[in-house]
Amino acid sequence: MTMTGRCLVRVVVLSVMLAAASAGPKGRRKMKGAPSSSSDHAATKLERANDRIDKAVLAVSETVDELDLNPYFFDSMSDIGFVESTAGGTVIELVGDDTTFWRWMRIYRLYRSIIRLSVAIQCIIDAIAGGSSADHMAVYLSYEERTTEDLWKQVQNLAMNSAYNGPSPNNIAGITASATKTRATVLYEASSKFAFDLARMNEEMGESHGALKVLQSAYGDELSVRWTENSPLPGREPLVDGRFTSKHLLHWLSLIEGIQTCLTRLTSSLKEAERRASQAERIASQVDEDQKADQDPHWEDLFAVLERIEGTAAAPTSTTSSRSKKTKARRKKKQGVPSTSSDHDSEAADSIPPSLPHTATGNVGSLYDVSSYLVGDVLPRPWEDSALDLGYEMNVFVHSINNELQNMLQLLAGCLSAITDRIRAVAPSATFAVVGSAGKGMNLPLPHSDLDILATLTSDELAQFEDNERELVLPLRTNARGMQVLQMPAFPLPNGDATIKVDLVPVSDKSSGSLLDVVAVRRRPDYHRTRAMVLYLKAFLRVKSSMVDPLLSSPGVGGMSSYLLQVLVIAYVDSVPDTCANGDLRFCIVGFFGYYGKYFDFANYCIDVTSSDNRFPPKSTFTGPHFTFSSVCAVDPHDPTNNLGEMTYRISLIRKVFGAAYDDLTLNDVTLLSLFPAPVTLSGNPLF
């Protein structure tokens, strides 16, 4: 059975908000007379394309209105209650009484109810057969936590700007080919995915109906099966003494017949929306091709990127954050956030360490300094010159990490040499930089480490390298941030005993922030303390993943990425300098566990280390569904349109792990190193 997961809510919302933003009075302003120029002709075409999109979305909404879906929802919540429980309370403030949003949300709600019914039927069959329903329950729980990552990746970048900013019906000049194509693509992806999944569900409901008819024929009125308390029981289903009887079976048969009728109607409407969106996309694409010639992506030289960043660093610019100017001016909500610079006088504000800067406002220094981050004979070793003063426990931990990293430098240097030699076979003038955790010295020892390499490659050179190394690389993909990534999941290390995962990323406007992040983090005055804290928390989550949930520290599938963890650490450290600036780092780690595990309200607040006055602004001050609909809202310091926490939907479990650690450290007074077993290194020995 195909399980789509919680992220599907956001896909619905994206397509809905795309439609809602563009919906207006019937009958856009029409062009009078024949088009007087090519631009007028293009505008007329784009009007026609947007009209197709509007009609498609409206048709789907009208179909939902015509169908009575309430009997098929297996919970007793209102629509508002369902949205609050699924996507967060800020969604209600965002969408208000937008009817289009609520119609599309009800389609998702029906889909989710069908999943529950399907699993419930299977659990009944298991119970009758005398078996266990544990496997099917695991599938259901996985559905509750899992997301359709591929679907989200297809639409999130396209919807980011268009979902809330559709063309105005009173402003023909505001309709662009790019915006129209984006709107069409968002609608096409959402409607085609929904149509496919609902059609599949219709088939599965038919199979379930047949299975229930067999049970009815075999047991008749004698059917009586005990329903376990852990089964996915529909909330409205009445049971006597926890038993499922023939009466319930008849009710389910009737429900399935009604559901299939709804699914047939909805699938037909969604396929029509898919068709109209495809037409609109073709029209917009043709206009776009007529207006400009296709151009190959231009990859700047790495040093040119750095020069551009440095050249714009000192120039005062208006912020490009996703937070609206209007809401920024509102009085800040202080409840639920630790003290920040806005809560103190100017002297207190001066004591806060510098935050990670936006690309447009950060100072990354000279090229001479930056050149030390480029790949040389060995990886950077930023920890060698620092005397540890972190408290006994953290001194032991970091010393062990540093020794292990020192031992693996030769292996990684050999690995880098092999990779760069292969790249230079197709791109002799390419330059490179190690970025990510390894570039910041925040990588765990092997085998819990990987390499991110930034390289100056043209699209042709990248394609040639991919072809040459096709036995080592996966197909080129574009990640959620719009960066191209060529992944080598198992690049052999020189010793021949192990492999390492390598991500090769061409330099672009989207990827240059990864190098800036290396520079900004390593230039923090408290770099060594921040690094130690990030390493400890990464090791902690890595071990807890093996004990609690294997995906806890796996980004992209609900877990927490290293980058997000780093931002959470910096936000907390900057907010409580008196606790974290000096002395035993244990106190800062305990505070981190307590704050994010017990206190911080992820549903209503964001993390923004670029904000000088409040590291934890309300989520309501942000725009864009990728911020407001996500489980975690965390602004990327080097790309303010990107939400680092967008895929971290296992945050509730991560909070429990952090909260339990806080209790152990405060109530039971355990040591930091006793919270988890020592990670095993490449040599097979524990780290400490």
Image (spheres, rainbow, N blue to C red):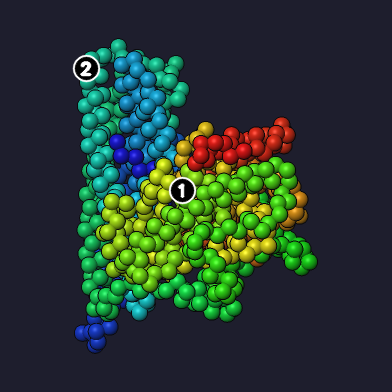
Identified at 43% across, 31% down, the residue is 235
Packing grade of label 1 (10 A; few <14, some 14-19, many >=20) is some
Q: Nearer the viewer, residue 550 or 458?
A: 458
Give me the disc on residue 217.
2
User: Label 2 sits on what residue type?
Assistant: Ser
Q: CA distance from mark 1 to mark 2?
A: 48 Å
Packing grade of label 2 (10 A; few <14, some 14-19, many >=20) is few
Q: Is residue 288 left or right of residue 483?
A: left
Q: Nearer the viewer, residue 519 or 415?
A: 415
Give me the disc on residue 462.
none
- SS assignment at label 2: helix
- SS assignment at label 1: loop
Residue farthest to the top, as pictured:
222
Give me the disc on residue 555.
1
Residue 380 spot, x, y in % from top left: 55, 60
| 380 shown above or below 198 | below
| 585 shown above or below 343 | above
Identified at 24% across, 84% down, the residue is 38
Whichever of labels 1 and 2 marks the residue nearer the N terminus, that label is: 2
User: Label 1 sits on what residue type?
Assistant: Pro
Q: Quadrant of residue 669?
A: top right
Q: Is residue 633 visible?
A: no
